[in-house]
Image (cartoon, helix red, strand yellow):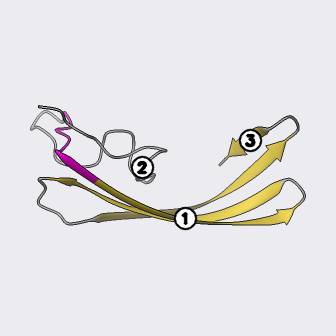
């Protein structure tokens, strides 16, 4: 029985890693058999090497008692010499 999980920087960013979805009574994430994730991100460079980002994520783990749980957040990103990136 292979389980999938949502939450964290690479899926639904408003939930901590593996924290989206059903849990046991003791709080252990159960995961799901099917994972759905949709993301939209808009970035705008406001100054040289500085971007402002607005994004929204939605996702689901099935079987689940909910269709989709939504999360959204705004942030900033800066690029610093030699390809380094800082995300806020």
Residue at the (76%, 59%) spot, across then down: 51
Do residues under tags 2 and 3 come within 8 Å of each other at their CB atoms?
Answer: no
Estimate the spatial distance between the alpha carbons at disc 2 and disc 3, rounded to whole Å: 19 Å
Q: Is residue 20 left or right of residue 62?
A: right
Q: Position of residue 55 (x, y in %)?
A: 55, 64
Q: Residues within 10 Å of mark 2 (few under 14, many from 20)?
A: many
Q: Position of residue 72 (x, y in %)?
A: 47, 64
Residue at the (18%, 36%) spot, across then down: 27
Residue pointed to by mark 2? 11
The answer to which of marks 1 and 3 sits earlier in the sequence is: 1
| Secondary structure predominantly adopted by residues drawn in magenta | loop
* Residue 24 is covered by the magenta coloring: no
The answer to which of marks 1 and 2 sits earlier in the sequence is: 2
Residue pointed to by mark 1? 55
Estimate the spatial distance between the alpha carbons at disc 1 and disc 3, rounded to whole Å: 17 Å
- Camera-nearest residue between 84 and 25: 84
Instruction: Identify the element where label 3 is drawn.
Output: strand
Q: Is residue 24 left or right of residue 17?
A: left
Q: Which residues are magenta?
A: 28-35
Q: Residues within 10 Å of mark 1 (few under 14, many from 20)?
A: some
Q: Is residue 70 left or right of residue 77?
A: left
Estimate the spatial distance between the alpha carbons at disc 1 and disc 2, rounded to whole Å: 12 Å
């Amino acid at each position: 029985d292979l389980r999938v999980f949502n939450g964290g920087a690479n899926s639904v960013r408003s939930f901590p890693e593996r924290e989206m979805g059903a849990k046991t009574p003791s709080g252990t994430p159960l995961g799901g058999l099917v994972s759905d994730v949709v993301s939209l991100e808009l970035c705008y460079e406001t100054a040289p090497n500085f971007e402002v980002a607005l994004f929204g994520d939605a996702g689901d783990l099935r079987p689940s008692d909910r269709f989709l749980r939504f999360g959204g957040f705004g942030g900033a990103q800066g690029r610093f010499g030699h390809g380094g990136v800082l995300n806020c």
